[in-house]
Structures are given as structure tokens and as C-alpha cells.
Amino acid sequence: MRSYGKPDANAAALVELWRRNGGEAWYMPPDIGYDLIVALPGGNLGIVEIKDGSLPPSKRQLTPNEQAQREKLQARGVPYTVWECAADVLRMIAEVRSGAVR
């Protein structure tokens, strides 16, 4: 786990689920605008922001920096996904396996 900033309470479990299903993930510094870079099959990379799904929706919104990074990356075709729960991770795994996310 990273040693800077306070990770979302569910981060370790979500990353572990991703890794158990063959993925890899690297934590990013807290001010960069996303939490993880994840390895996708075929050598592609994706960006993941983790939000704690147990918090109220107002506490799960992207910060202005996160939103700006999301817009920049998506404009360049880079997947930027928000994980709030295990279902989000499993959905991304299924999309990667089906070829929907590259």
C-alpha cells in the first residue's frame, strides 16, 4: 500500500481483487488526479480513481483536479474508470476480457 496520503477505505480490497484476476496496479501520488495506473491485457494501461462506495454520493464526487485529469485523458483515448465497489472491478475485468476495454 502507498505510504503517502490517506487511501480510500476500500482501496486495498479492490486492488487485491484486480490482482487476483490477473491485473496489476500501481499507486500514484495523491495530487496527480487519479489513484492507480492499471495494466490491461495486450500491454495497454488504464487509469483508475477509487472512491469509497460506502460514503454518501456528495463525498464520492471527483475533485476538480480528478475531473480535469479525467477529461484530458479521455480526450486522448485513455480509459479513466472510477471504482467504488467490487462490482466495478468485476465489470472492468469482464469488459477487458470481452475486448470492450483496450
Image: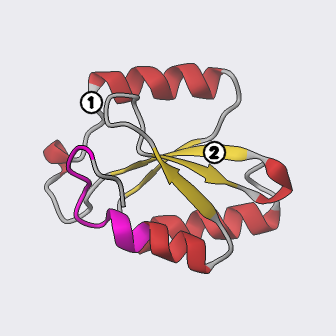
**Residue sitting nearer the eye, 38 or 61:** 38
**Residue sitting nearer the eye, 4 or 92:** 4
CA separation, marks 1 and 2?
A: 19 Å
Q: Is residue 85 visible?
A: no
Q: Which mark is residue 63?
A: 1
Estimate how packed mark 1 is, as few (under 14), some (14 to 19) or many (20 or more) residues with alpha carbons within 10 Å: few
Where residue 63 sits: x, y (%)?
27, 30
Residue drawn at point x = 71 percent, y = 29 percent? 77
**Residue sitting nearer the eye, 77 or 21:** 21
Q: Are marks 1 and 2 in contact (CB under 8 Å)?
A: no
Q: Tag 2's secondary structure?
A: strand
**Residue sitting nearer the eye, 43 or 82:** 43
Residue drawn at point x = 79 percent, y = 59 percent? 41
The stretch of residues the image draws in magenta is 4-14
Tag 2: residue type? Answer: Gly
Where residue 84 sits: x, y (%)?
35, 60
